[in-house]
Image: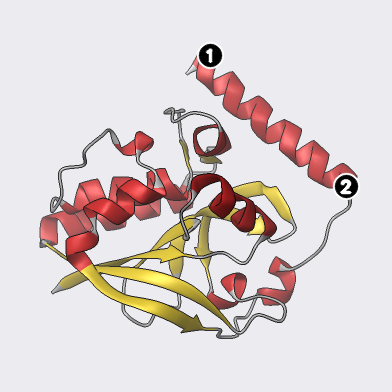
Amino acid sequence: MNKIYVVLIKAHTGLGSIARKLKGFEYTHVAVCLDDKFQDFYTFSRRKHYLPADSGFMVEKRDYYAFGEHQDFKTRVFEMVVPDENYSKILSFIEECRSDEEMLFNVISMVFMPCEIYKSHNCMTFTAKIIELSGLINLPKVYYKMRLKDIDSVLRPYVYSEGLMDRQPSAHYDEYMQKYNIVTKVVRTVKLFGRLVGRMFTK
């Protein structure tokens, strides 16, 4: 039996707090797990906690969400039982995102306007695409226009649990929490936007 778990996450980050106030929705991030151990969270996100513009495909760990003094984080989890053929498509899509060095983080679609940009995803479009590939749900809109509230709405029949998930230590936590100076942050942000805008007009 093939199961996938979509996990809505209430992020402890400053950006997460701002998003909650602006969007009026408690959860500010989403990821996919392939088992109920909830140790590997597949998504598109920042690769370094203090360098948001260095983002892309990630396999996040619990202590990336419950970092610093935080010992847990709130989640809403959905469980989906997926047919073999569709499960294979999901695994292939995840591997494609993992292995393609051209894949970018689509911050434009996340922050400004829902749009499809060549070889790019954010946590919402990545998860929505997996939901679509499951074959269990007809999305109410094209996958790259799905927002967190939309994902929550279509998955309500599949609610598995809701509550706090405990922190667990991971091998690369210290590397993930490395700090960067403002120049590095600005340069990385300009480069990311430049590559995304370039693809909007050339791909």
- Relative to 44, residue 146 above or below: above
Q: Residue at x 60, y 56 (%)?
A: 16
Per the model, the C-alpha gap separating discs 2 and 1 is 29 Å
SS under mark 2: helix
Question: Around disc 1, counting alpha carbons within 10 Å, would you say few (fewer than 14), some (14 to 19), or many (20 or more)?
Answer: few
Colour convention of the picture: secondary structure
User: Camera-side residue: 109 or 192?
Assistant: 109
Residue 174 x %, y %: 73, 75
Quarter holding the N terminus? bottom left
Image quadrant where residue 186 sits: top right
Where is residue 116 drawn, in percent x and y? 42, 28
Badge 1 marks a residue whose secondary structure is helix
On screen, residue 50 above or below 125 = below
**Residue 92 in sight here:** no
The residue carrying pointer 2 sits among few (fewer than 14), some (14 to 19) or many (20 or more) residues within 10 Å by Cα, namely few
Q: Residue at x 74, y 32 (%)?
A: 190
Residue at the image point whose x is 68% and y is 50% from the top = 52
Determine contact: label 2, label 1, CB under 8 Å.
Answer: no
Q: Which residue is mark 1?
A: 201
Total labels: the figure holds 2
Residue 182 numbered tag: 2
Residue type marked 2: Ile
Amino acid identity at mark 1: Phe
In the rendered structure, which disc, 2 or 1, sits on the residue that comes first in sequence? Answer: 2
Estimate the x, y position of residue 135 in percent, counting from the top left. 14, 50
Residue shown at the point (49%, 51%) measured from the top left: 24
